[in-house]
Image (cartoon, grey):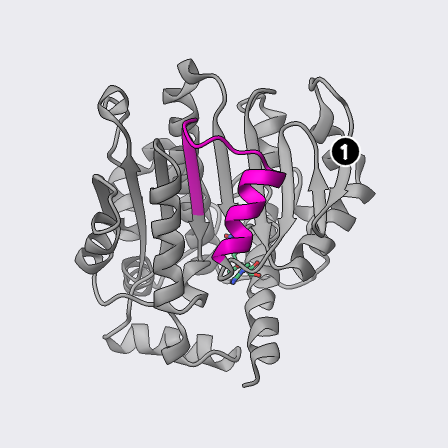
């Protein structure tokens, strides 16, 4: 594949993620009043995928809300969503007033993707009005293939260009090095070669003194089920060698530890589904669609993991650090 084709295939993974979320929401797995504005499809997903999407969205949102809760006393908090695609997290949090006017939420993706997102946000007042709700200046500007207002920046950048990334975060987003900062990376670093992905992880650790990192990804598949998953990925135009996959959860853990993150907690999505997600909610969603391939469900979840880590000074060490 040419680099351009490869980039197009990567961007298409965003459409795929948005469609999966839309399908899960339409079936009642969780509520997201905004996702339908980003998707135009009649596609349906298997119950297995809907349930997996639910687990991932709930688990990530739970960690984000916990970060926001525990950093309340600090004033300004910063959230940076890497490869945000059409993710609606900002709008969902903003609607519930979980992020306030002192905070800053940054979404980064390729310019082609952020331009599409900008167009959709501008088209729908349900989205656009949340940008300036209860803020001081009430103004929204166009910047760097995206949008900028007091609490939200949508920025087009290739994350591999660390110098551009650092310039944009410092000068356009005006992030401060000392405010509590959360980086979210959901199915993004997988598509970036390991050395570049590592540089991104290291950049955040070096540049912010109080940082938490959420990583949701696939593990390197060694069993037949995992190899089939990889085949499906390859059919979409990726070669396994171009993906940044680590052989084990332990290897992922060490990857973050070596860059100065002190508390690294990592769990397979199977463990998270079984032990972390709310029992009542699981009972509810398990009744939505019949799932008879329980073994497949377990295998699917075992191939994904969620990592949460923290780098903070002694004063901030009290933040809850387990998933
Ligand atoms: N994080 C979103 C979610 O979970 O719904 C989207 C996930 S999608 C699988 C991967 C996203 O990462 C795409 O929107 C893609 O364009 C973006 N991405 C991958 N590599 C990137 C890079 N080098 N620079 C900027 N964005 C990138």
Local packing at callout 1 (Cα closer than 10 Å; few below 14, some 14-19, many 20+) is some
Q: Is residue 65 left or right of residue 143?
A: left
Mark 1 and ligand 1: say if the CB distance to the nearest ligand atom is below 8 Å: no
Residue 160 lies, with reference to residue 311, above or below; the image says below
Return the residue nearer the eye: 192 or 164: 164
Q: Is residue 180 magenta?
A: yes
Q: Position of residue 182 (x, y in %)?
A: 42, 36
Query: How many numbered marks are there?
Result: 1
Residue drawn at 43 percent across, 29 percent down: 65
Residue drawn at 72 percent across, 36 percent down: 127
Start-end of magenta stretch: 162-184
Residue 111 lies, with reference to residue 154, above or below; the image says below
* Residue 89 in sight from this viewpoint: no
* Quadrant of the image containing the N terminus: bottom right
> Which residue is outermost to the bottom?
1
Q: Which residue is mark 1?
A: 140
Q: Is residue 47 left or right of residue 131?
A: left
* Residue 178 in sight from this viewpoint: yes
């Amino acid at each position: 594949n040419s680099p351009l084709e490869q980039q197009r295939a990567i961007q298409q993974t965003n459409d795929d993620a948005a469609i999966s979320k839309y399908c899960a929401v339409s079936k009642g797995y969780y509520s997201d009043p905004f996702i339908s504005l980003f998707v135009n499809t009649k596609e349906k997903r298997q119950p297995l995928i809907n349930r997996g999407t639910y687990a991932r969205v709930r688990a990530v949102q739970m960690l984000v809300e916990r970060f926001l809760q525990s950093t309340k006393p600090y004033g300004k908090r910063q959230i940076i969503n890497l490869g945000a695609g059409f993710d609606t997290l900002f709008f969902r949090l903003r609607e519930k007033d979980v992020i306030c006017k002192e905070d800053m939420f940054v979404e980064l993706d390729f310019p082609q993707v952020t331009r599409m997102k900008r167009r959709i946000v501008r088209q729908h007042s349900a989205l656009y009005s949340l940008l300036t709700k209860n803020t001081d200046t009430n103004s929204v500007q166009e910047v760097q293939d995206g949008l900028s207002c007091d609490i939200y920046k949508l920025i087009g950048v290739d994350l591999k260009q660390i110098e551009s990334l650092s310039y944009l975060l410092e000068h356009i987003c005006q992030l401060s090095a000392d405010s509590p900062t959360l980086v979210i990376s959901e199915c993004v670093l997988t598509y970036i070669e390991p050395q570049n992905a590592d540089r991104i992880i290291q950049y955040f650790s070096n540049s912010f003194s109080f940082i938490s990192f959420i990583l949701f990804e696939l593990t390197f598949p060694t069993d037949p089920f995992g190899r089939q998953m990889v085949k499906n990925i390859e059919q979409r135009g990726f070669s396994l060698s171009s993906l940044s996959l680590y052989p084990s959860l332990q290897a992922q853990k060490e990857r973050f530890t070596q860059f100065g993150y002190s508390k690294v907690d990592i769990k397979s999505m199977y463990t998270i589904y079984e032990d972390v997600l709310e029992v009542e909610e699981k009972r509810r969603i398990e009744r939505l669609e019949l799932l008879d391939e329980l073994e497949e469900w377990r295998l699917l979840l075992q191939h994904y993991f969620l990592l949460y880590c923290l780098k903070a000074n002694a004063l901030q060490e009290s933040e809850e650090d387990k998933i």
